[in-house]
Image (cartoon, helix red, strand yellow):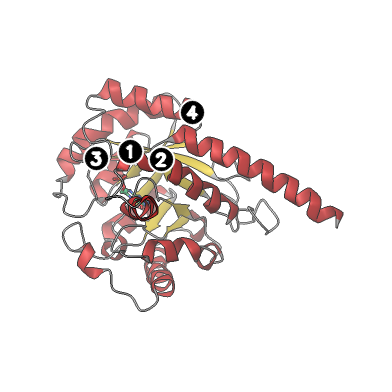
Amino acid sequence: MTGAPSHPAGRGAPRGWGTYAQLPAGRTLVMGILNLTPDSFSDGGAHAGVEAAVSHALAMVEAGADVVDVGGESTRPGADPVAPAEEQRRVLEVIERLAGHGVVVSADTKHAQTARAAIGAGAQIVNDVSGLGLTEEMIEVCAAADVPYILTHARGDSATMDSRARYDDVVEEVRAELLQQRERLLAGGVRPERIILDPGLGFAKGGDQDWRLLAGLDRLTSLGHPVLVAASRKRFIGTALARARGTEQVPAPERDAATAVISALAAERGAWAVRVHDVAATADALAVTRSWLAAQSTIDHQS
Ligand code: PMM
């Protein structure tokens, strides 16, 4: 990534970032989710086995994923913690295989040892959802490897996060807490251009807090770091759909069309990347968003 933005600031122009080594610049990227967890809320157990996992990941790349995010520990509220050794057993071989295929892999982990091993296996980005629990060891690993680091807002762990969803002003507090953690990363030697920010939708958030964070995305993109939006299939989407349909909570696999709409809106607001399960739907949503914005900029230049 270079320091300078690749776009003039404006609608749909990702702000504050240039390009990471192999990743295209100038458009919102798609991060496809590969959860290698038996208890993941949305696709648990479906990709058991290395072969199935690799072919699912390659299918996501074929469908338009720029990055594949590989995780071995479920982060949903109430999920059991996974020891780093078991987490590594689940992910390392898959990461190695994907890196061998030239896929850009991010390692979704809260454990510094797993991040280190994942980088050794070929992962190029560390995706950490520790939030306020970010460890010094994780900072050391990322500084030493000089890899992009996704700093995700979260309070507490899977057992406690729901009880910590108390904010006076969720957008301002999430921003301030991310900036605090950013200071720790910088003090530990992580270069500023390596830090990607994520509001941590669903992590210690409830009610309409996730929607407020999306609506206030400019407060994060204006900080000059790339911003990742990871809304895919999350509970707040199911709740909004249920309210609109007048039904019970809408289940995770029925949230993909709504997720694609959020991807489009996030791209319009300058998100660097969106993390999704249904890559094809989001790739299409981003393609039509780009066409819309390209036409918009022509009109803007004429007037
Ligand atoms: N959410 C989940 C897992 N990893 N990573 C980042 N950076 N941000 C997130 O919000 C995030 C994440 C949980 O969702 P999943 O179980 O569908 O993967």
**In terms of sequence position, does the residue under pointer 3 or pointer 1 come before the other?**
3
As drawn, 123 above or below 193: above
Circle 3 sits on which residue? Answer: 72
Tell me: residue 68, above or below residue 185.
above
Do the CB atoms of the residues marked 1 and 2 lie less than 8 Å apart? yes
The residue wearing badge 4 is 63
Q: Respond yes or no on whether mark 2 lies under 8 Å from ligand 1.
A: no
For the point 35% across and 26% down, the residue is 56
Q: Amino acid at mark 3?
A: Gly
Say if 18 sits above or below 165 in the image: above
Determine the CA span between mark 2 and mark 3. 22 Å
Horizontal side of 296 relative to 24 (left or right) equals right
Instruction: Give the distance between the C-alpha atoms of the residues marked 3 and 1, in whole angstroms.
Output: 20 Å
Q: Earlier in the sequence, mark 4 or mark 3?
A: 4
Q: Residues within 10 Å of mark 4 (few under 14, many from 20)?
A: some
Q: Is residue 152 left or right of residue 79?
A: right
Marker disc for residue 46: none
Between the C-alphas of marks 4 and 3, the distance is 23 Å
Q: Nearer the viewer, mark 4 or mark 2?
A: 2
For disc 1, the marked residue is 253
Res 136 → quadrant: bottom left
Instruction: Report how far apart the C-alphas of labels 1 and 2 lie in the structure.
Output: 7 Å
| The C terminus lies in quadrant | bottom right
Circle nearer the viewer, 4 or 1: 1
Query: Front-most of 147 and 160?
Result: 160
Which residue is under mark 2?
A: 256
Q: Position of residue 170 (x, y in %)?
A: 39, 72
Q: In 3D space, how far apart are the residues under numbered discs 4 and 2 (Cα atoms)?
A: 15 Å
Of all residues, the one furthest to the bottom in this rendering is 168
**Residue type pointed to by label 1:** Pro
Secondary element type, mark 3 = loop
